[in-house]
Amino acid sequence: MNAGAALGWWGVPLAVFAGAIRVSTPFLFVSLGEVITEKSGRINLGLEGTLVMGAMAGYAIAYLTLSPWLGVLAAGLAGLALGLLHGGICALPRVNDTAVGIALMLFGTGLAFYLGKPFIAPKAPGLPAIDLGFWSASPQVRAALQINVLFFIGLACAPLLGWGLRHTGIGLTLRMVGESADAARAMGRSPVRVRLLATGFGGCMAGIGGCFLSLGYPGSWNEGLSSGQGITAVALVIFARWRPMACLGASLLFGGAGALGPALQSVGVSGFYHLFNAAPYILTLAILILASRPDRMLGGAPGELSITK
Amino acid sequence: MPAFPSLTRRHLLGGAALAASQGAIGSARAAGKFTVGFIYVGTRNDYGYNQAHAEGAAAVRKMPGVVVVEQERVPETVAVGNAMQGMVQLDGASLLFPTSYGYYDPFVLKAAKADPAVTFLHCGGLWKAGQPLNAHSYFGYIDEAVYLSGVVAAHSSKTRKFGFVAAKPIPQVLRNINAFTLGAQSVQPSITTQVIFTGDWFLPVREAEATNSLADQGCDVITCHVDSPKVVIETAEKRGLFTTGYHTNQMVLAPKGYLTGAEWDWPSLYPRLVRSAMAKQPIPNMLRGGFHSGFVRSSPYNPIVPAAARKQADAIRARFLAGNVAIFKGPIQDNKGSTVIAAGTVLDEHDVTLEQMNYLVAGVAGSVS
């Protein structure tokens, strides 16, 4: 039909570039949300369940209302509800946030599968993409530059959250609660309330990240849709040292590395495909090892975080 | 086998609202009726492997005097043992279709030994002498239909490069890749197929990436062998490419580019098997068939398929139906240059060496290791 000439080896950098954009968006949203949650001193491991729930809710509402944006809204609200549930349970005395997170991961996934049964077969309208490749005659470049709107929203959120954390009163309160709950209480702030809201925000972002999978790329709802993007994004937060801009970089790196395996096979590098498919994880391990210092704590880790305390 | 633990588990599940999320679709014990159980590894409406079986189950459901019970998303673990036990003991099933490859050994074999009165019909396994006689294995020579897809697609391709998104380099998959390529080459010898192995049966994001990479390399026909072809077909349609389907009919997902597809014809086979089982007629332990026995079929042609392509494909299909054409006849070289089927050798569809295929034919770019 309209396939152009073969790209050959140029296909690999193009695929990595396009993959970085296409595959990174769920990582980006989930990790940005989780930065806010963790900055308040709490970790939510349930985001995998939230992501799947968001993917299902977004697809279902987009299908029922024929509006993908109402789907995004529904995904955000579903995520918010799960986030607030996590925050609410953790506000009770002597509750471990890691355990609640794992419980909510299973709950969110199970609930999404249960409610999502009728929505596997139908086709929901997808989120629009912006055609930035109009200048190119190459169909490959044009396809790579069909960039989903949600990616740009995530792209804008990263510097905005970074700035907000550093330069606004809300950001200061959030960081204070995360560094020392006692100090926050002395200042008249309620750590419980701040953490509840921060976890709610994190859930909302994860829900939106999830609906990118069902409404953006690959663009349909199915029970096997997520291959652990939610839980990977939680790890990316630590990798990014709790900095929103670094989350953006980490997500792009992860997305691009994920595209490497298929791209190399398409140009004939067919051996070791399992190894290339594992590239994102190998990369993460390598960078974490290279970046680690035996003489100090993880930089940027909030003092109240249960995993670093 | 102790009935009690399984009984408790099923009752608990059946009573709780959670039952649906566990995949228990329905249970019925109807007196005097013949109960048939179907067990799927994934979702029934996945536009793929499981949907093909569920369409067969739907055909069985229409038979008078038959009750069908189904369970989805049953992993290839001890969970399938429990599911089979539950269907036999609680639903009174006398015939079971555990449809996923990994169910066979050891779970189906174990269950067949424990309940000699129940018939087990397993898809894809290799029954061997010495295994329980009430365990049966059936499978279709779907490579015949895949070969036809290659023939049809060869007429539409302009770049003469085909892309194949495959899960794992196992014999069934390699046989399809080879048949697809040989079918295309029978029309246009210069056609090549680029394979991408994703590494697993269901990886939506990687399947989409693989499809995009193949499109970037100039492939203009895409097909696949993964559990749910939905993502591959939809992504290829977005890129404006031709597709041929697999497992079931995916025309609705890609009305512009979907040329035809290789489908399992389980709605034709399953009622026949159920009738045999009800009449207590013997069923072979190793049951195989292609077009000839109504195990496989092709999706109806897209209107864009040219008349020449239809004519050629229909002629080959007629020969498959008559049972007098072999896809794998020598000389065939693999893509490393060694001869894998010598000149003069014809491997007909029943040849078991084909079920151990470990090579890609010349013209396929990819590696089995």
Image: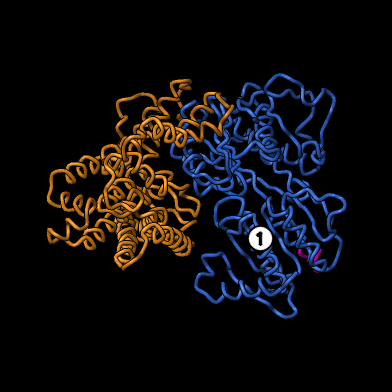
Chain colours: A orange, B blue
Can I make out residue A67 in this image?
Answer: no
Residue A162 in percent (x, y) is at: 21, 42
Q: Mark 1: which secondary structure? A: helix
Crowd class of label 1 (few under 14; some 14 to 19; many from 20; radius 10 Å): many
Q: Quadrant of residue A188?
A: bottom left
- Extreme front residue here? A295
Residue B321 in percent (x, y) is at: 77, 44
Q: Residue at x 75, y 24 (%)?
A: B332
Q: Quadrant of residue B147?
A: top right
Q: Give above or below for B276 relative to B264.
A: below
Q: Residue at x 19, y 43 (%)?
A: A160
Q: Give above or below for A1 relative to B278.
A: above
Residue A119 in percent (x, y) is at: 46, 59
Q: Quadrant of residue B368?
A: top right
The overriding secondary structure of the stretch rendered in magenta is: helix
Q: Which residues are magenta?
A: B274-278
- Residue placed under numbered mark 1 in the picture: B80
Amino acid type at circle 1 is Val
